[in-house]
Image (tube, coloured by chain):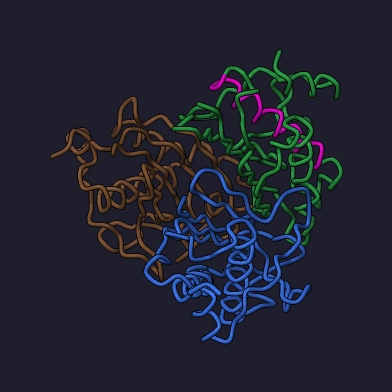
Chain colours: A blue, B green, C brown
Amino acid sequence: MSAVEDRLSELGLAVPEVVPPVAAYVPALRNGNLVFTSGQLPMKDGAMPATGKVGAAVDADAAKELAALCALNAIAAIKSVVGDLDKVTQVVKVVGFVASDPEFTGQPGVVNGASELLGKAFGDKGVHARSAVGVAALPLDAPVEVEVVVAVAD
Amino acid sequence: MSAVEDRLSELGLAVPEVVPPVAAYVPALRNGNLVFTSGQLPMKDGAMPATGKVGAAVDADAAKELAALCALNAIAAIKSVVGDLDKVTQVVKVVGFVASDPEFTGQPGVVNGASELLGKAFGDKGVHARSAVGVAALPLDAPVEVEVVVAVAD
Amino acid sequence: MSAVEDRLSELGLAVPEVVPPVAAYVPALRNGNLVFTSGQLPMKDGAMPATGKVGAAVDADAAKELAALCALNAIAAIKSVVGDLDKVTQVVKVVGFVASDPEFTGQPGVVNGASELLGKAFGDKGVHARSAVGVAALPLDAPVEVEVVVAVAD
């Protein structure tokens, strides 16, 4: 088991099965030394724990946990193409899309759920550049969607 | 003519003239072995076949066709910088922005219009990572906007 | 002082201190020859000159100036990781997120504020691929958020 998975295990987390794409694409793709994940929804055991807009049906704390779940699914997607997660040399970029009531402006706190999990999983290599934005709606009425770019060793 | 254009031709499609940017940027830019397109709108012969929000003025089926049109314009943008589309070694990443009524959550089905066209055009090389999100509004009231990253041979 | 900063100085602009992240990430990150900035908000001297949605509380002209401020903060973020801005060989990609009233569709004009400033700062190297989208809400109720990818020399 990779050191990354050891650290997740200490948090009581396991890398899940990769979430099958909702459509005509792949969960993650490697090109050169970069791996691009598809936008990950907060699926757990094949279902979404909550749906709706953050700031309305879903509160910020619940959304932060869902963002962590998106990040865990991104880790699963990365593992599906690199095999050994310890090959990841750097988390490069994260974009967090938060389905937002137009009055909700706490997107950074929500997407911290993803950033913090990546930090715990990858340690020093988990630091990344990031954008957090509030969108009108997400697939399957997900409250959060997260995409990740990582660098991997040759 | 490239094999990519041959395949499009079999679908009754031709790579259009590149759509002039609405503003101060270029349709696509190559850096190293990656080509990044600008966000492509569903323009056809200089006009947009439909405008408005998906789930309201525009239905999902019509939006899916518009997404395919965005992808065709992305192919034109890529061609404008690489010349020969057969130099594309991999479609790497697609982001599909769908101008959405807040109640509309079928973004994956819409963006499939782009993913499927890229698959038909590039074959095995057309498989990609992808994010689909529902945004509040798009330039010129476009229902869909698609950006693409591809890898090209040296 | 770099030639980039000389050009900004002629416009009466200085590269500001880098804006501290709102959350668990870094302002910019270099991987290989690419630098990815985090999404930059229009902060000036630690405060945001205006908040709200473009097309409602904020008009397009004001938003364009805010987009330029985002780009200036992106330049600061890039400088924080490369030191000398003249090492930038190409501005590669810009994404401009405009917090939009659903009826506002002038995102390209707003994001031109960022594109034009990058052009003035980096000259021929400032030309880039770009997406402009209208989102439901942004962090801290910012009207605009801009992220930038640049290439740098070894």
Image quadrant containing the N terminus of chain C = top left
Task: Give yes or no for residue B79 being in the magenta stretch.
Answer: yes
Q: Is residue C80 left or right of residue B40?
A: left
Main secondary structure found in the magenta portion = helix
User: Taking A140 as reference, is B37 above or below it?
Assistant: above
Coordinates of residue C99 in the picture (x, y in percent): 54, 54
Count of numbered marks: 0
User: Taking A48 as reference, is B55 above or below it?
Assistant: above
Q: Which residues are the magenta region?
A: B63-82
Task: Give yes or no for residue C102 being in the magenta stretch.
Answer: no
Coordinates of residue A141 in the picture (x, y in percent): 74, 66
Q: Splitting the image into 4 quarters, where does residue B2 fall?
A: top right
Q: Nearer the viewer, residue B76 or A71?
A: A71
Residue lying farthest to the top in this orientation: B1
Q: Splitting the image into 4 quarters, where does residue C140 fall?
A: bottom left
Q: Residue at x 25, y 53 (%)?
A: C80
Q: Splitting the image into 4 quarters, where does residue A143 fall?
A: bottom right
Coordinates of residue C71 in the picture (x, y in percent): 36, 45
Residue lying farthest to the left in this orientation: C1
User: Taking C137 as reference, is B110 above or below it?
Assistant: above
Coordinates of residue A116 in the picture (x, y in percent): 47, 74
